[in-house]
Each structure stands twice: as structure tokens, then as C-alpha cells.
Image (tube, grey):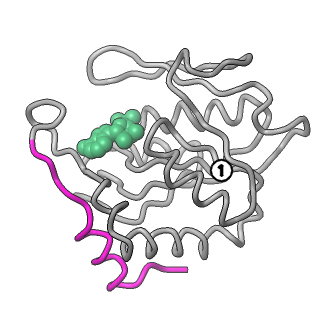
Amino acid sequence: MKLSKTERKILENSIRDIQDFPKEGIVFKDITTLLNNKEAYSVLMNHLYQKYKAYDLEYIAGIDARGFIFGAALAQMLQIGFVPIRKKGKLPYTTISEKYALEYGIDEIEVHIDAFGAEKGARVLVIDDLIATGGTANAAATLVNQTGAECVEACFIIGLTFLDGIKKLEEKTPVYTLIEVA
Ligand code: AMP
């Protein structure tokens, strides 16, 4: 299930570049302009649905916070469960957590210990809007696997290929990106 040239163009044209946000030197990929564009949002969600309906997934795990938007919508389309992977301190029940390096300092994400059900080996897709260094997604895939579930793929709308995040994550799980930014 490949994205057509026209579909890719619609998606690319709907994403807005914000220079120097949140700090100088960063080009922030703003996906709010994809979400409020009904054609682009629909192209995106239909593509994800067509691709992942054959994967026999049991859960989508969305990464805080933009991964929640696509992840929750996709889970509903596939009629499977949605699990939020959150920044530390937000989830109320027992969690497991994973630290990862940022450019300056470290961050931590966590997931409920029982989020993927009582049976081991649930098939899980991790999703976020963008992969840069891959630190966040790597920690997310680790968490999924630590609960006893299986991260079968990690999916991103945008992959920044000038960083080696995708390559590093591919050592752990298959990676799918719709749009690559070189
Ligand atoms: P990383 O852990 O370096 O792969 O960073 C990925 C996370 O940071 C994702 O949740 C993205 O939403 C966010 N992020 C990193 N860089 C950008 C960027 N240039 N534009 C938009 N979001 C970004």
C-alpha cells in the first residue's frame, strides 16, 4: 500500500515550516495545518488505515502529545485499542518508565503497566508525528516491549533523514515514514 505521488504532495503541502521554533536553528514541522485541512487529514488517515489493516494489530501506542491525535483516530478506524505513552508524572496508575537523552539533558516517558492487556505478546504499533534523533521513539518501543507486548512497527508522518534517528530505531523495530525531509 504505497502513498501515490499526488497524495504525498497533498501531505507535504499541508505541513508548515516554522523557522527557529522553539529555539534558533530548529525548523519546526507544524502539522496543525495538516489537521485542519480536511483533504490532507483524510488522505493521511485513509492511507494509514489501508496500510495497517493487514497488520493484525491489537493496540496503537501514541506518543505524547501529537501521536495521540493520529494514533487515537487510527485505533478507532481499525477498531482496536489506543494506549497513551505520556511524559512523566501524568499517568495515574502503576507505570513503567524510560529515560532518554535530549539535546540538552534527559526526558522520561511512561506507560501503564497493564496497558496492553493481561496476555503477553500483544501486537502494538507505535505512532508519532515526527522522528528526529529517535530518542523518544526508541524509549517508547522499549516500554512497549518491557510490558510484555510486541512493538511490531513504529510509524511517523515525517522522518528527518539528516539525523540518524531512523537508522538507530530500525535496530529495534521496523520503521515507516510517509514523508522524508533531507
Ligand atoms: P526525537 O526524540 O529527537 O526523535 O524527537 C521527536 C519528538 O520531538 C517528537 O515527539 C516530535 O513531535 C518532536 N520534534 C522534534 N523535532 C521536531 C521538529 N523539527 N518539528 C516538529 N516536532 C519535532
Find out if the beta carbon at label 1 lies less than 8 Å from the nearest ligand 1 atom: no
The residue where tag 1 is placed is 60
- Depicted 37 relative to depicted 131: above or below: below
Considering only vertical position in the picture, is 89 above or below 149?
above
Task: Identify which residue is drawn at 65% across, 27% down.
Answer: 111
Nearer the observer, 42 or 127 = 42
The N terminus - image quarter: bottom right
Vertical placement of residue 38 versus 180, above or below = below
Q: Label 1: few (<14), some or many (≥20) within 10 Å?
A: many
Does residue 133 appear in the picture of this structure? no
- Residue 146 visible, this orientation: yes
- Residue farthest along the right direction in this orientation: 119
Name the kind of residue labelled 1 in the image: Ile
Q: Residue at x 53, y 49 (%)?
A: 127
Residue 91 location, x and y as percent? 62, 22
- Span of residues in magenta: 1-19
Residue 130 in the figure: left or right of residue 87: left
* Mark 1 residue element: strand
Left or right, 84 with reference to 33: right
For the residue pair 133 and 124, the one nearer the viewer reads as 124
Was residue 140 drawn as part of the magenta stretch in this picture? Answer: no
Percent across and percent down for residue 173 are 59, 48
* Number of dots carrying numbers: 1
Splitting the image into 4 quarters, where does residue 133 fall? top left
